[in-house]
Each structure stands twice: as structure tokens, then as C-alpha cells.
Image: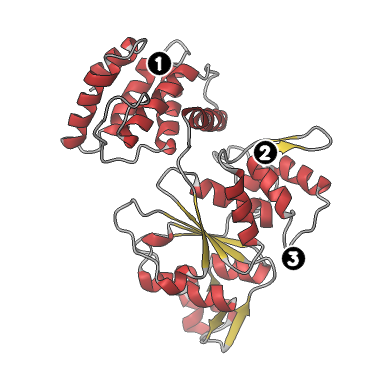
Amino acid sequence: MTSPTDSTPPGGVLRPHAEQQYADELAGLAEHDDRPRPPGWRLSPWAVTTYLMGGELPDGTRITPKYIGPRRLMEVAVATLATDRALLLLGVPGTAKTWVSEHLAAAVSGDSTLLVQGTAGTSEEAVRYGWNYARLLAEGPSERALVESPLMRAMRTGAVARVEELTRMPGDVQDTLITILSEKTLPVPELGTEVQARKGFTVIATANDRDRGVNELSSALRRRFNTVVLPLPATVEEEVEIVSRRVAQIGRALELPETPAGLEEIRRVVTVFRELRGGLTDDGRTRLKSPSGTLSTAEAISVVTNGLALAAHFGDGVLRAADVAGGIVGAVVQDPVSDRVVWQEYLETVVRERPGWQDFYRACREVS
């Protein structure tokens, strides 16, 4: 049986964990890492940042960038994990919060699987601990009847625990983290014991304030976190690079037939998304209405990946305007009434008049 931290992912796994997929890079960094490491860490803070931002080792091993953006943000995030404060990655949907948290956990503790997914239905037991009710009825409260949460396991082993979409969890469930983060203990009153966190334990949470149904963090809980805001890519070139890299990785994982990347089409998708979410064309001359969706980098990656699948299986193997048009329309037109008006106006006033975009205009008109 393969454990979550085995370096070789099981055959046929669609998406290996970060510590499996990049095991060679992590091993290479550990071998050449001679800098001080905080207690319980697999790598030094410098090596963790290099793993995230990319670089080259003395033996020529290339470390691929996992995050494309300001290096200082990642240095602040890594430095936070080396203190007694938890880390909150904040940003709009699609700014790589989950991606960064997974790779941070993989690099720091070698295990990114200690995860609590925040939803409106997340219970207190998912954060603290639960019970095997068959054993509880048969034996009463006991260690054998206790079901550990990912946070409890992280505390016992001195690892990084991840909490996704923290603001989606009810406020009273959020606040169960306060004792864990401030006292570094988790009381188990039913057994008259407590779990004390080992060195290396910390929490990385993600949150965004753009989605509906969010629950604001209490001031007491917010003080336990150091917040790092992950921005949308600053330039078109930066976003095109992010989309190209992720699409190539996803294509390899899905074993899509070899298809040229189509940088021109990727640039078009990115340009459309940036202009619509910003409410202004790239040249700054035309103001635009913005649709209801976020149109983030994550949506751009999805549109291009879908386009590559269309080109590979139903086209000539080259990514063209017709392959991405349907995905773009589906991403932009979330509200069939108001968003369709926004899209049609953009199509006729911007895309139609843009030199070299006639094929894109025709393709979008066919599916609109």
C-alpha cells in the first residue's frame, strides 16, 4: 500500500501530491541545503523559497518555478512559518492560494495531505477530533475510539496542517482554531488529556473575500495569523507564462496528445480576461463593463486546457481560435442575461475592431 508521502506516485494517479510529483527536486534541495533549518523542517527557509520560485542547484539540477510573482511575498510567507504565527494566504479566486499552500507544506514537512476543506457544513469535529461511535458505545471514551483530525495529526507529528477556504466555515467552527494557534495545545476533555504540538507544527489557511457565503474572521482569530495577500499577475507576460506552464503540466498529467502550446491563443485568452475583469482595454482607450465572474488565471488555464483537448481530439492538433472560443464564452457568461450583454458589447466594440483578431471574432460569434 502506498502512503501519501511515498516519493513514487501510484500508477495511474491523475494528480500526484506535490511531494510525490517533485520528489527529485525536494531531494536535490535537501542534499545541497547547508543553511540552518527550523526545528522539524525538511529544508531551510532559503531552500523552501528556492523550491517555490525556481533556481539551479550546484550539480545543474533545475528547480522549476511553482509560483510566478514577487519573490518577497514568498519570503514573507516562509518566514511566517518559521515563527509561532500561522499563515493566511488571502486573495481573489484563482491567485494560486491552494497551489502555494500545498507546495509550502510539501517543502516544509514533506506532507501536503493534512488538509481540512472549509465549507458551510464543516463541523467542529473536522477541525478538532471525532469519535468512532461503534467503539465509543462498546468501550466508552478511549484513545482507540478517538478519530484524529488532520490538525491533530499535524500537532502530534510536528507537520504543516492546511485549512482551505477558512472563511467558508461557520464562525464558531473557525474559532476552534484559537486555542490550537495560541496555546499550541488541543484539549481532549473526554479523556482528561491534551495533545501538545511538536516543533514544526504550523497552519496554512487560505481565504478569499470575493465569493458569496463567506464568514468574516473574528478579530481574535485574525490576530493569530500573519496575512499574505496573493495578487493577480501584474502583467500580460507574467500571466501568459503562468498559464503556459500550468497547461503544459496538466496536459502531461492527462496524457493529452502532443499539441503545440499556441502562445498566440493563450495571449488572446489572457488579454480578454484581463480587459474584462479590469474594465479597461490594454491601450487604456476604452472603458468596459465587467461580467459577474472573476475571470482569474485559473479560469484562463481551464479554457486553454479544454482548447488543447479539442485541438488534439477533434482538430488538426494545433490550438486555434475556434478551440478556445467556447470556453471563453462559458467562462464570461455566468449570468445568461447581464453577462451576455457585457460579452456582446465587448465582442462588437473591441474584438471586432482589433487587427489580427478576425478569426477569433468569427469563432466567438459562432458560439455566442
Counting from the top left corner in percent of width and height, residue 101 is at 55, 52
Name the kind of residue labelled 1 in the image. Answer: Phe
Q: Is disc 2 in contact with disc 3, using a CB cutoff of under 8 Å?
A: no
Task: Describe residue 91's horizontal placement relative to residue 20 as left or right.
Answer: left
Q: Could you say whether the residue bearing mark 3 is in a helix, strand or loop?
A: loop
Q: Does the rendering let one see residue 131?
A: no
Query: Disc 3 marks which residue?
Result: 39
Can you say whether 278 is above or below 191 in the image? Answer: above
Q: At x 26% / y 41%, what residue is drawn?
A: 292
Most distant residue in the front direction? 285
The numbered mark, 1 or 2, whose residue comes first in the sequence reads: 2
Q: Is residue 210 above or below residue 163?
A: above
- Tell whether label 1 touches label 3 (CB within 8 Å): no
Instruction: Name the residue beneath numbered marker 2.
Output: 54
Q: Earlier in the sequence, mark 3 or mark 1?
A: 3
Q: Tag 3: residue type?
A: Pro
* Residue drawn at 60 percent across, 65 percent down: 202
Task: Indicate the secondary structure of the residue bearing disc 2.
Answer: loop
Q: Residue at x 44, y 36 (%)?
A: 297
Measuring from the top left, give residue 184's x and y in whole percent.
Answer: 60, 76
Q: CA distance from mark 2 to mark 3?
A: 24 Å
Quadrant holding the C terminus:
top left
Label 1: state its secondary structure: helix
Report the residue at 37% width, 22% height from top.
324
Residue 11, percent from left and from top = 62, 38
**Residue tagged 1:** 314
In this picture, is 334 found above or below 282? below
